[in-house]
Image (spheres, rainbow, N blue to C red):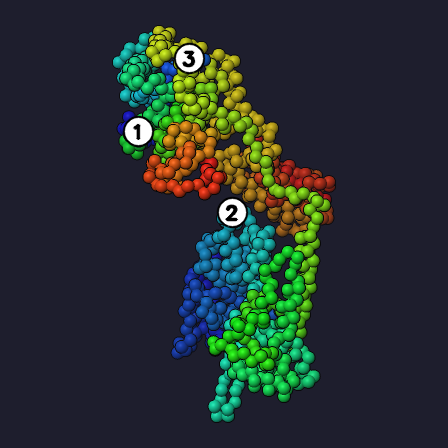
Amino acid sequence: METRHLIKRAKYKTTAKGSGIPGVLEMTKNKIVFKPNDPTSVTMINVDFRSIKGHKNTKEGSSNPPLINLVLDQGGSYIFEFENFSDLQVCREFVVNSLAKSGEGLIATSDRPVVASHDEQLSTAEMELRMKLLQENSELQKLHKQFVLGNILTESEFWATRKKLLDGDSSQKSKQQIGFKSSMILDTLPLHDARTNKLTFNLTQETKYQIFALKPAVQQAFLNLVPNKMTEKDFWTKYCRAELLHFKRNAMAAAAEAAEDEDLVIFLKDDDILASEARRKIRRVDPTLDIEADQGDDYMHLPDHGIFRDGSKEITESQHEVYRRTFLQDLNRQGEVVLEGRTIDVELDNPTKVAEALAQSRQESDATAKEERLYRTSRMTEMEDLQAPHDHPFAPLCIKDPRDYFDSQQANALKTYDDTRAGTEQLSCSLNTEEAYGFLRSSISEIKAMGLSAHMVRPEVALTVINGLTQNISSTKYQLGKNVNESVLDRLPNTTKEELLHHWISIQELLRHFWSSYPITTSYLYAKTEGSHVKNLSAARGNKGIGSLRAPPAGFPPRSSYASGSRCCFPTLRVGFAEENGKGWREAKWICLGEVYELHVYSRY
Amino acid sequence: MASAPSKLYADDVSLLVVLLDTNPFFWSSFSLPFSKFLSHVLSFLNSILLLNQFNQVVVIATGCNSCDYIYDSSSATNTDAESGRMPALCSDLLRKLDEFVTRDQHLGEKDSLGPPTSSLLSGSLSMALCYIQKVFRSGPLHPQPRILCLQGSTDGPEQYVAIMNAIFSAQRSMVPIDSCFMGSNNSAFLQQASYITGGVYQKPQQLDGLFQYLSTVFATDLHSRTFLRLPKSVGVDFRASCFCHKRTIDMGYICSVCLSIFCKHHKKCSTCGSVFGQPQSDVPSASNVK
């Protein structure tokens, strides 16, 4: 049983290293209250467990004093130092329980402490994950309720077999890459200092990465020039000057500057790498068609679309064409890079490394593109008559006896086609109206006079009828499992079916624990198999009397490697726990009363 | 009856409404004599009443020109002394049936249209549903109702709409329609009725063992059906009748507004008045009618 109330001496600390304020820490079901020994002190804590997100604590045996750190929801934390580690341990248990309770009533309703047999350190995040899993999976919740709350398995044992669930979920959460920013970095305006008439460009590591990604030529130049020919600072200054020239959209000035400084040319000219990339893309277009690639990919060839960044239309200056760059080109390039996303996974601190990584990733993508193209070509150019026919996954329409569907209305159909003929037919095959009614009345008076006969149905006829009616039922025994689409379970009433499935799942769960205890190496495992679980297996079947487990065959437990599996005779149930039924398997039969229950358990030496 | 304590109205107490086909043209040409058929049915009704003292049986005769209640076990009077050969139920029912047949014949004589060949199943279904509604509204305690059609004559396509309406209202009030069809071919109407309402459709192969069929299949109350496996029908004929000529059709035209069914293209829907355009190509916009 958990304690509902807890009082310990402790010191409240703002940091782990400080001396702290001595006082009394009091924990109740949903509150933590700290009162300092010094009544004049203003430090007094009174918080709800709900506002606490998690906790950390120091381990016994480490050089640290016994500390517990309660992390608050809104940020910040409380650190308490205890007198000894046993106090800390008790406190920690209490916090874990209380957190679980305030988070969700599900697990906390258990009377046993959440952490039981093993020295398992459960973080709040883990608890939350477990509770989330239980909430999402009603079947799991049912099992949990039955076994953990029913004191058959402990919490940790229950989850030990579901490590995959726990792991899979946490790994899913962590890895999410931040995409490429979609805002145009080229739009970042320089800060203008009027006094010194200086422009200050502010380049962060992120911006540098973005520039590299957007402009392969700049990246290439960076690799070539820095640090052999110039310093990094010089490089960026030059780059910024080039940007400024573009920004002022002065093609003449740009041309003049370029003539003076040969390094500046790379920044001012169209990105050759981009252009060749676009050309290469067109070359790569496969024999059929790829709409993705287009000669106008970069809008290079469409001078009419040259709109500058402030929206004004360009004035054609043919001789300086190389130094013109239009807004649409920039925009398209930006869009392309954003869609590509982050292709590298390195720290952004070192521009050189970033540039190198980018270059490498470009080569890689080239290689994959080539491969893909080869594959596509081979697929598209295959000779049809040399290929095996494609197998379409279809099932032929199978109507057992079409007459059952369509013959019933034949009489009507015939009749309506020719009313008069049908009318005469009707009359010819029977009597006229008066005679017919007369016949009916005579039948009634006949039975009135005769009364009910004692032998209404002859025994042989009755037997034939019963056989005919039950043939469907008795034949299922022989067709069991032969039809994939139809299982015996579907024929059972829904409640029975669900009950059956639930029993199966619980038995499977217990068996999993049972067999996972082999080989029995510790007394704990021995107790687990001998004491509780075998009995629990029979307990699990409930009061419906499904069956009991036979003792394991002689020679158990297996000496070395072990494996286990089970199989059920339901076609739908065969999945799940079943492994293989090959040679060297020892069979322990789990025969259940009732016709349809039969479960075989195999284990291998 | 309504004052019976609630626990007596357990979920296995049934109200069985039997629709008896009394089509003279069918019975006069059928292999099983009508008297034989009646003896099987009467024994079946007796056994239903014996199964549970609160079970209730109502019999409606389905004639060619009219339908009528011919027996109701809740209002049966034991004034007729049992004649030794026959229980009061039977003599009462047979007397009413005789009267009904006479009346039905007179009604038919007034019509100059020649002999009708199909029974008025739609009428008797509606009467059964009305009776069941009356029982439903009598109070919170009532037996579990179900309808059993003992039909022999072929379907009347002209009753298609009425029958389908009856079927859907039965489905809505959760009343299963069981059908035992004795004619030579299967009845599409009854197949659909049983399929839609969750009842049982059965076509007895051995007609001299009819009682065995009735007591094995159709005597099971709704409670027992949850855990018994009644025979399943192989397939259901879902074909409909067109609204214009009352013909049974495989393919047809459907009004996109009111879902009326027609066997050929019309300019205007006769039911809701919607005006149709011409079919676009030579491939008619025919849709398969289920």
Q: Residue A284 in the image: x percent, y percent?
A: 66, 62
Q: On the image, numbered disc 3 is attached to which residue?
A: A428
Between discs 2 and 3, the one toward the N terminus? 2
Report the amino acid beneath label 1.
Cys
- Amino acid type indicated by mark 3: Ser
Q: Judge left or right: residue B3 versus residue A563.
A: left
State the mark number for residue A84: none
Q: What residue is shown at x 68% (from left), y 79% (from top)?
A: A224
From the image, tell me which residue sits under label 2. Answer: A139
SS at mark 2 in the image: helix
Sort mark 1 into few (<14), some (14-19) or many (20+) by Cα contacts within 10 Å.
few
Residue at image mark 1: B130
Name the residue nearer the viewer: A549 or B146: B146
Badge 1 element:
helix
- Distance, label 2 to label 3, CA atoms, is 68 Å
Mark 3 Cα-neighbour bin, 10 Å: few <14, some 14–19, many ≥20: few
User: Residue A232, relative to residue A8: is it above or below?
Assistant: below
Residue B55 in sight here: no
Can residue B149 be seen here? The reply is: yes
